[in-house]
Image (cartoon, grey):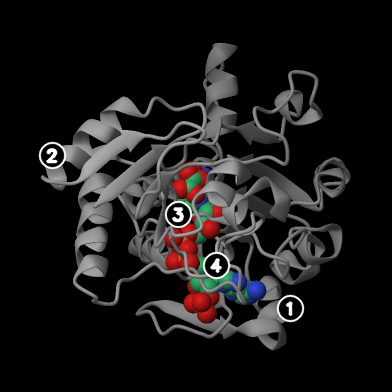
């Protein structure tokens, strides 16, 4: 069995070595243009050339959870596109979202600014019940986040395409349930895949519905920059309709130095690091799926091209 590793600007060697250890007997190599045919490829943002040169490819394994960079490419007809399921990311996502939520709810950002001025300030406690959290997308990551937030006794709403019952989470389903979901939520957490149906979903109209249309909504975007209509955000913050935003992902990454988001006082920016792929965990997962495919068994995480995720 032959496996190619092609990871854009990331170094392939640790992945090649790890896959060789996990799959003894497999011929694992870093991909180079014109390389001989392989059975499977392990990739991050591969060039179209790899797919054009490997029409026999059976498995294309993405080392991330989001496959929007891959669904744009032309895949050979029999190639299964497989995404990472968790791969160590769910717990990190839960940490990140809980941190952003609690920092906002407890006003730690205000205390930090006061402390820098040497000011001993006291803020009135806020009602947890007034800070309902809405999680968009209840997949591997969204479900973990919703459960973690519920542990802190915040009211939690969850929205997904087909609906999912999660203890302690009020469920909303599909387009019909969307406006009610937004109205019932004050802090909006985005964990949707980027697809034709979800591009631009964080727009002026939808963000204005948060918190029953009252001012004070808050946005945490940890999915993809393409979900956010970027030009809509600053006016919503400046008018007070939104109280703030924590953003980990952007339409253009790295976020350009001149971008307004860097300096806006109500926006917290992090560099697409809310949940990082854990290499060893992911190698074990991918190797397990390659073995299963070789035995002719079904595997999880296969992307449905009609849905786009
Ligand atoms: P999953 O595929 O497991 O979950 C996707 C969820 O979104 C499902 O609940 C699905 O609904 C729902 N969904 C998809 N389309 C729609 C729609 N049109 N309307 C309503 N709900 C919809 O994905 P993961 O949880 O593993 O990952 C989510 C995303 O997080 C990734 O696609 C990626 O973009 C992002 N990500 C960001 C990272 C970062 O570092 N910032 C790291 C890792 C991932 P249903 O259950 O009905 O299918
Ligand atoms: C991913 C990511 O999709 O890192 O895994 O964003």
Residue, disc 1: 179
Residue occupying image coordinates x 76% and y 29%: 264
- Residue 21 is tagged as 2
Say which element carries label 4. loop
Callout 1–callout 4 Cβ contact below 8 Å: no
Q: Nearer the viewer, mark 3 or mark 1?
A: 3
- Residue situated in front as seen by the camera: 178 or 105: 178
Residue occupying image coordinates x 58% and y 83%: 172
Which is nearer the N-term, disc 3 or disc 2?
Answer: 2
| Rendered location of residue 163, percent (x, y) | 51, 85
Residue, disc 4: 309
Q: CA distance from mark 1 to mark 4?
A: 23 Å
| Rendered location of residue 250, percent (x, y) | 68, 40
Say which element carries label 3. loop
Q: Nearer the viewer, mark 1 or mark 4?
A: 4
Q: CB of residue at label 3: within 8 Å of ligand 1?
A: yes
């Amino acid at each position: 069995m032959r496996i190619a590793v092609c990871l854009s600007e990331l170094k392939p060697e640790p992945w090649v070595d790890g896959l060789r250890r996990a799959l003894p007997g497999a011929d694992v190599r870093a991909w180079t243009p014109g390389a001989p045919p392989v059975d499977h490829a392990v990739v991050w943002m591969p060039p179209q050339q790899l797919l054009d040169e490997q029409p026999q490819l059976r498995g294309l394994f993405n080392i991330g959870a989001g496959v929007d960079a891959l669904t744009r490419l032309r895949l050979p007809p029999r190639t299964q596109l497989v995404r990472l399921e968790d791969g160590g990311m769910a717990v990190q996502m839960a940490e990140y979202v809980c941190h952003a939520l609690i920092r906002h709810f407890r006003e730690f950002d205000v205390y930090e600014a006061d402390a820098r001025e040497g000011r001993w300030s006291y803020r009135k406690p806020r009602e947890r019940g007034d800070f309902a959290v809405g999680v968009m997308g209840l997949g591997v990551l969204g479900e973990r986040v919703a459960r973690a937030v519920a542990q802190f006794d915040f009211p939690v709403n969850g929205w997904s395409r087909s609906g999912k019952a999660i203890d302690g989470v009020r469920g909303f389903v599909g387009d019909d349930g969307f406006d009610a979901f937004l109205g019932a939520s004050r802090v909006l957490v985005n964990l949707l895949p980027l697809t034709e149906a979800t591009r631009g979903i964080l727009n002026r109209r939808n963000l204005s519905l948060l918190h029953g249309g009252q001012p004070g909504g808050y946005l945490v975007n940890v999915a993809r920059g393409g979900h956010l209509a970027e030009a809509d955000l600053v006016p919503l913050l400046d008018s007070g309709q939104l109280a703030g935003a924590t953003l980990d992902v952007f339409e253009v990454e790295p976020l350009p130095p001149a971008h307004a988001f860097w300096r806006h006082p109500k926006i917290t920016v992090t560099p697409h690091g809310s949940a990082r792929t854990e290499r060893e965990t992911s190698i074990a997962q991918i190797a397990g799926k390659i073995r299963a495919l070789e035995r002719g068994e079904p595997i999880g995480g296969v992307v449905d091209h009609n849905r786009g995720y």
